[in-house]
Structure formats: C-alpha cells, structure tokens
Image (cartoon, helix red, strand yellow):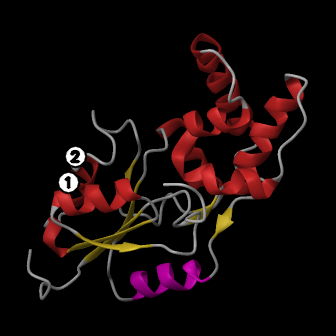
Amino acid sequence: MSAGRPIRAVLLDLDGTLLDTAPDMANALNLLRRERGVPVLSYEAIRPHVSHGAAAMIRLGFPDAPDDEVVDLRGRFLELYREHLAGGTRLFDGFESVLATLEGRGVPWGIVTNKPAFLTEPLLAALGLEKRAACVVSGDTVAQRKPHPAPMLHAAKLIAHEPAHCLYVGDAQRDVQAARAAGMRVVVALFGYLGGTR
C-alpha cells in the first residue's frame, strides 16, 4: 500500500472511538451485579474494559462464574444494556466537528464494529447517526469479526472505495490488525479506553 494514495473514505470503530459508550455499559454491568446480589463496581474499574465487549465485561463483573453461568450472565447483560442503550452514550469530544468536516468535503464515513447489529443499529438511531453513516458493518454483518479483514473489506465495498484509499480509526489491537490486513491505513484513537489492558 502506498502512503501517497489519497484518503477518500474514513471508517470508524464504535465503542471507544466514535462513541463513549462506557457509561451505559457500566450501568448495565452494575444492574446485573445488583440483580445477583453483589456490590457494584466503580466506573473507573469498568471503563477500560468496554472496548472488549460483553464477554470481557462478564469476566470483569463475575470473575469466578463457571462457564455455563457465563452464557446466561452475558445474555442478561445484553438485555439490560439494550434496555438502557443510550442514556449516557455520547460522541467523543470533537467528533461532531470531525464528522461535519468530512461530510462538508464529500468524504464518506462509515462504521465497522464488533458490536452486534441488534445493539449497533438502535444506538446509532438514538443518536441520529444512522442516516449520516455511509455504511454500518456490525459484528454479525459478515461471517468474521475483527481482527479478520472481512468486515473492513465489506465496508470498503459498500462505500465503493478501494481499501487502499480508506483510513480506519480504532482503539484496539484488533482494529490495527484488521485494517492492515485489509490494506487500509490506520490511526489509533488514544482518547478512548486505552488505559485498560489490551
């Protein structure tokens, strides 16, 4: 891939990159902990783990749960999160200006996330972003998830741009791996949840 090729489209990760979803995910985890009769965790303890998805949240909240219970806990966590999906979630500071600038210059932007569509789509709708995004590739849109390049390549196809002309912005190692494997340039979002373990 030539670094001199122009960037004609921008693709974004969701949690920890475009959106600060930590308040609502932390709330869901603590609602679940209350249901199970255990004390809540501090927001500071939960926030660094948000980018790793529901399984990581359950491992954090219920580290001693046996495998068969983890499945049920994860399902209930997702139910609670879906019920309180956008109470505290917001664009990261400055991103409204970024999106408006891209749109003003005719540069399409889209989303490639491992978040499942049943959460991604209503969340974007609640924030008024679903019609602005040129494409939305969720964790179950194609058969593979990041770090596999398939979601990235699918997004590039949807927006009709070669991967080499796309820039991907993400906050996790899998984002970098997926973008590079797809032949895209990548920028790491240092403002998200990078304080946690990777």
Query: Which span is picked out in magenta?
Result: 94-104
Question: How far from the left and from the top, in percent, is residue 167?
Answer: 28, 73
Residue bearing mark 1:
153
Left or right of 107 on screen, residue 8: left
Element assignment for label 1: helix
Residue bearing mark 2:
150
Element assignment for label 2: helix
Position of residue 59 relative to residue 92, above or below, is above
In this rendered view, identify the residue nearer to me: 65 or 50.
65
Q: CA distance from mark 1 to mark 2?
A: 5 Å
Q: Amino acid at mark 2?
A: Ala
Left or right of 98 on screen, residue 76: right
Position of residue 103 relative to residue 179, above or below, is below
Q: Amino acid at mark 1?
A: Leu
Overall secondary structure of the magenta section? helix
Q: Residue at x 61, y 51 (%)?
A: 50
Quadrant hosting residue 153: bottom left
In this rendered view, identify the residue nearer to me: 51 or 112.
51
Q: Are marks 1 and 2 in contact (CB under 8 Å)?
A: yes
Q: Residue at x 32, y 62 (%)?
A: 176
Position of residue 55 relative to residue 16, above or below, is above
